[in-house]
Amino acid sequence: MQPLTQTRPKPLLRILNTTILEHNLNQLDGIVEDVIIIIGYKGEMVKSVIGDKYGSMNIRYVEQKEQLGTGDAARQALPLLKDKFILLNGDDLYFREDIKKCLAKYPSILLGHVKNPSFFGVVDCYDDFVRGIIEKPEKCKPNSLVNTGLYCLDKSIFDFKIEKSSRGEFEFTDYIKFFLSNERLRFHSTEKWFPVSHPWDLLEANESMLGDMRVGIMGAIKGNVDNGCFIIGNVVIESGAVIKNGTRIEGPVYICKDATIGPNAYIRANTVIGPNCNIGSGVEIKNSVIGGNSKIPHLTYVGDSVIGEGCNISGGTIIANYRLDKSTVKAIVKDKKIDTLRIKFGTVLGDNVNIGVNCSIMPGVMIGANSIIGPNSLVKKNILDNVKYFTKFDEIIEEK
């Protein structure tokens, strides 16, 4: 999830201005009384956001001091477990009804559908039961059910002894394989699970959550909207936000508190604009997530992109989101080319990126946190954190 996780752990990334972790806690509230959160990278940030009480639930923390895999992480909670427990990833999105249905089928696992099942553990099922899990198979059916990482189990599963995998990690699925050799495991399948493995997954999650918004216009608009604005469809405008005249907003759109939009801005569907943002004149934003305290003051296009917090995108900048050959956009992640499976995908900016005037950013490019892109630059490749990047142009003067 770099460059977004350079400045925060993945569970604190936001969907509709709510962190992924808080979303999951909201789904669990009223179902469980006690929650154990396994923390590692930037764990103190998690503790400061969540605290020791969330809703009606008591929160406790256990640190995984070494990143030794999901099996090791889950086992850290063993001394605090009473008997039955629900285990879920803190950085994927789950929903209350699915959790309840899994509990009703205890012991059980939640399965889901994804576009790219070969990236996950594909589950072999029969009737209402799981037969086995195949980790990231090279070939599988497009409609294969995959492991979502949510389980309803008993702490006795940790009685099994597992070894490190070929990746050098203890995998929780190895506990499941031992369990299946002795017991039967039921499953519930869902269409409402969103794995957040790559930055563009945030776009899909936001698209779905925005699509599920059911708001009456009068109840959704709590900010100040000038005369001469056009607001169409499901739109949330939080208190303190200001929409200046001539601005057009086509829902579903979510505008957070104290944001300023316009005048004469164009906010298109499936966009989330974070708190204290400034989106100025002549700016068009489509299907994007704009992090809090970011500024896009004028004459800019942002499409199908994820913009971190505290960014500044200067006038005349265009973020391209579509390949001329009409193929899906590819991105480089950890030196590997990954197919986003999206026909339209723009850029990902880490926090506090500053982009000069008249820049062009090509589809699938990612720019690291705290970096500066000089004016008139053409950005065709990923840019690391904390660097200055300029495109060099030669000045040519000739007699006529």
Image (tube, rainbow, N blue to C red):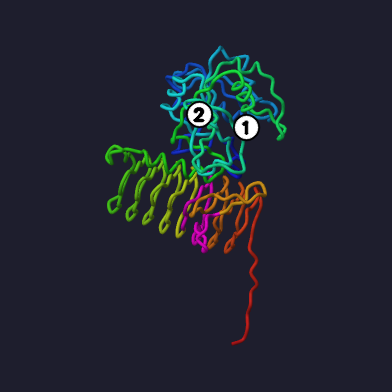
217 left or right of 124?
A: left
Q: Is 148 located above or below residue 101 in the figure?
A: below
Point out the stretch of residues depicted in magenta: 301-329
State which quarter of the image contains the N terminus: top right
Amino acid found under the numbered disc labelled 1: Lys
Residue 261 at what x, y percent from top left?
Answer: 39, 50
Identify the image quadrant of residue 390. Answer: bottom right
Front residue of this view, candidates 189 and 395: 189
What residue is disc 2 on?
126
Residue pictured at 59% horizontal, 37% vertical: 8
Residue 219 at what x, y percent from top left?
Answer: 29, 37
Identify the image quadrant of residue 138. Answer: top right
Q: Secondary structure at mark 2?
A: strand
What residue is disc 1 on?
42
Q: Residue furthest front?
A: 126
Circle 2 crowding by C-alpha within 10 Å: few under 14, some 14–19, many from 20: few
State which quarter of the image contains the C terminus: bottom right
Residue 322 at what x, y percent from top left?
Answer: 50, 59
Front residue of this view, candidates 315 and 80: 80
Of callouts 1 and 2, the N-terminal one: 1
Q: Secondary structure at mark 1?
A: loop
Q: Is 131 located above or below residue 378 in the figure?
A: above
Q: Nearer the viewer, mark 1 or mark 2?
A: 2
Residue pictured at 41% horizontal, 59% vertical: 282
Q: Is 83 located above or below residue 342 in the figure?
A: above
Q: Is residue 314 magenta?
A: yes
**Separation of marks 1 and 2 at Cα, in angstroms:** 41 Å
- Asked if disc 1 and disc 2 are in contact, CB closer than 8 Å, the reply is no
Amino acid found under the numbered disc labelled 2: Tyr
